[in-house]
Image (spheres, rainbow, N blue to C red):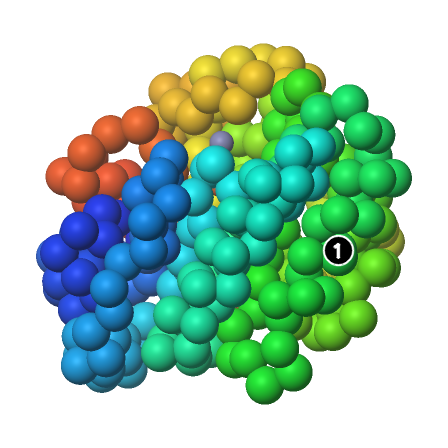
Amino acid sequence: MLHIGCHLSASRGFAAMGRQALELGANTFQFFTRNPRGSKAKDLDPADASALRDLMARHGFGPIVAHAPYIMNPCSKDDGIRRLAEKMMREDLALMEHLPGNYYNFHPGSHVGQGLEAGTHLIADMLNRVITPKQQTVVLLETMAGKGSEIGGRFKELRQIIDQVERSEKVGVCMDTCHMSDGGYDIIGNLDAVLEEFDQVVGLDRLHAVHINDSMNPPGSRKDRHARIGEGTLGTETILRFLTHPALRHLPFVLETPTDDAGHGEEITLLRQLAEKV
Ligand code: FE
Ligand code: FE
Ligand code: ZN
């Protein structure tokens, strides 16, 4: 069973997202734990979380992905920003305990001139402080386009973080197809070779989710501008290869393409149809 969905607005609550996913033909989805550019936490209604868990079980959903806000930078030079990142992640992981067995994805951060060593050390340090032995959420590091001093543009940078985390069984990776191509990985020409490299450097057993986005920019551009499926430089073929790859097809796939809910519904329907024919 292919698990495919899109990013949804969390403003109407958990169960509402589940119902909306169903309407769009999705059986997974992603949401921001709080305003993506703000920091205020959402109030949690345990009954709402429980209603979503029921809906997901009844409808055979794959795991869902909570996305940390973009402003979170655990490897900032500014310790106020780092403390805020830690506070947000701690609160978000507490919230996710109401939806056990799902994922919490974050952008590793930008080291802003401190260098890769210092940056990965700060990220791992924060993870070592917030991850608890009993937590039921795996935290995912997203593969990034590598713009500016962004960490996570190379697989070995993710490895470097994971190597410094004590409870590394609680840490995995979420691939982003736009970011990988923009970062210079040849997923258009040779996905097998890219996955082979990922397996050697990080390990495919660490890979838990994939963001499926086309890209507005050519491979290696380090830009990070998402395009709708089939309207960018990756093309529908490249995305389909992810959805149907024997090493990937069991994973939840989430669209973060620049369109509205109805547009995502169309992309989900189209990709399901095409994936079935492969
Ligand atoms: Fe992201
Ligand atoms: Fe992404
Ligand atoms: Zn992106």
- Taking the spot 77% from the left edge, 23% from the top edge, the residue there is 113
Label 1 SS: helix
Q: Position of residue 226 (x, y in %)?
A: 43, 25
Tell me the quarter of the picture where residue 197 sits.
top right
Residue 22 seen in the figure? no
- Check mark 1 vs ligand 1: CB closer than 8 Å? yes or no: no
Image position of 42 (left or right of 183)? left
Q: Position of residue 264 (x, y in %)?
A: 24, 40
In the picture of the structure, the residue carrying the numbered disc 1 is 124
Residue 11 seen in the figure? yes
Q: Nearer the viewer, residue 89 or 5?
A: 89
Q: Position of residue 202 (x, y in %)?
A: 79, 55
Alpha-carbon neighbours of circle 1 within 10 Å: few (<14), some, or many (≥20)? many
132 over 105 or under it: above or below: below
Image position of 170 (left or right of 252)? right
- Quadrant where the N terminus sits is bottom left
Q: Nearer the viewer, residue 143 or 124?
A: 124
Q: Nearer the viewer, residue 240 or 221?
A: 221
51 over 151 or under it: above or below: below
Image position of 99 (left or right of 103)? left
Q: What number of labels is visible? A: 1
Image position of 36 (left or right of 112)? left
- Taking the spot 58% from the left edge, 62% from the top edge, the residue there is 139
The residue under label 1 is which amino acid type?
A: Ala
